[in-house]
Image: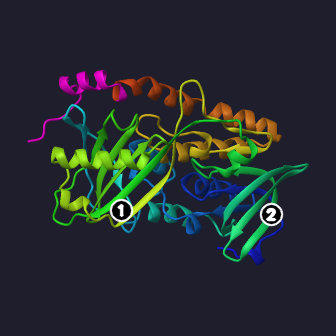
Amino acid sequence: MKTTADLRAHYSTIIVGAGPAGSTLARRLADKEKDILLIDGSPLRGEKVCAGLISPDAQDLLARYDITLPGTVLSSPQIFSVRTIDLTTRQARHYRRSYVNVNRAKFDAFLLSLVPDTVDVISALCLRAEREENGFSLLLKTQNGEKKVSCGRLVGADGASSIVRKSLFPNKKIKRYVAIQQSFRAEGEDPYYSCVFDSCTSPSCSWIFFKDGMLVFGGAFENKHPRDAFEEQKAKLVSLGTVSENIFKEPIKTQACTVLRPKLSGGIFNGANGAFLIGEAAGFISPSSLEGISYALASAEALFEAFSRGGSTRQAQRLYKHKTIKLRLKIALKCVKRPFMYNPLLRRLILASGAGSIKIK
């Protein structure tokens, strides 16, 4: 990790955000470029609200890189089914799922550790990005004060609240929710993973999972009174008998952040004129499950391939958009699928039918 004194004034490429998208792009580009700055905001921003569940698609992408996760990154337990609960109708079904349960902070740190030393990495928050005649200038907040750096090519990998997207493309709007998550001590409880729906309190979904002796409950809510909706869901879960009232009494940790939901009509934006967006900063996230790690890895790889072909910035921009067509189609299909999950009547019929569910013995 570099200090502000070690930073150069100008880089050919600056990547804002060192999550799965930013770290993957930096690692892949390192063999082709020796003039990269990767900005890691996590030490100053804190942990991300995330289930820390690696989907099969994300597992496949990691396998293609021949990446194996060390045991220190994994969390306990590993669960092979999800219980879907409708709090309004009190219906529940189990479905087969193959997620890998990880500690999200340790997972991100592991991916960052794979970035070669030839990449400059600094702990800082990007406060502002501005377009200049020959590229971009960034104002960074570090532990030692503010610092300005510039680059010819800028990549925003800084998540749902992307400063790069807000600074350079303020008119590119996308639907936003407030994600709230709390952790509770739950030693001795039988672990499970649940996806929770309640049309009375949220148009999105919530989740319950266990991680190293803790029960974690979180959800995505509309911007108006999200905490009230969150607490109402907790009360319903207690009333249903899903979670003990004693467990919910004392939260160990409360977190909140913005989460995006792309739509069929738009929201996804790859960037323009030398500024590129990857991962959730571009809107690459599942509109149904809110899973984002696989999209982060896939969009980072797509941009790496676009850069590797050489040519002008404009050519790279066109190629990157072309290489993310499959991601866009995948999101479009999930937008089509979404009503079957989130429309109360359709969800009630599907849960009643038991289609695709498994029987717990």
Residue 187 coordinates in the image, percent (x, y): 20, 66
Q: Quadrant of residue 214?
A: bottom left
Q: Quadrant of the C terminus?
A: top left
Callout 2 crowding tier (Cα within 10 Å): few <14, some 14–19, many ≥20: some
Q: Give the SS element for disc 1.
A: loop
Is residue 352 found inside the magenta-colored segment of the image?
Answer: yes
Whether residue 52 is visible here, answered yes or no, is no
Disc 1 residue type (three-letter): Leu
Q: Which residue is mark 1?
A: 74
Q: Is residue 266 left or right of residue 58?
A: right
Instruction: Report, in whole angstroms, how far the alpha carbon at label 1 lies from the one at label 2.
Output: 36 Å
Callout 1 crowding tier (Cα within 10 Å): few <14, some 14–19, many ≥20: many
Q: Is residue 339 left or right of residue 88?
A: right
Q: Give the SS element for disc 2.
A: strand
Q: Who's the residue at 68% across and 45% down the image?
A: 165
Q: Which residue is mark 2?
A: 149
Q: How is the image coloured?
A: rainbow
Q: Who's the residue at 83% across and 40% down the image?
A: 312
* Placement of 326 over or under 193, stated as above or below: above
Q: Quadrant of the N terminus?
A: bottom right
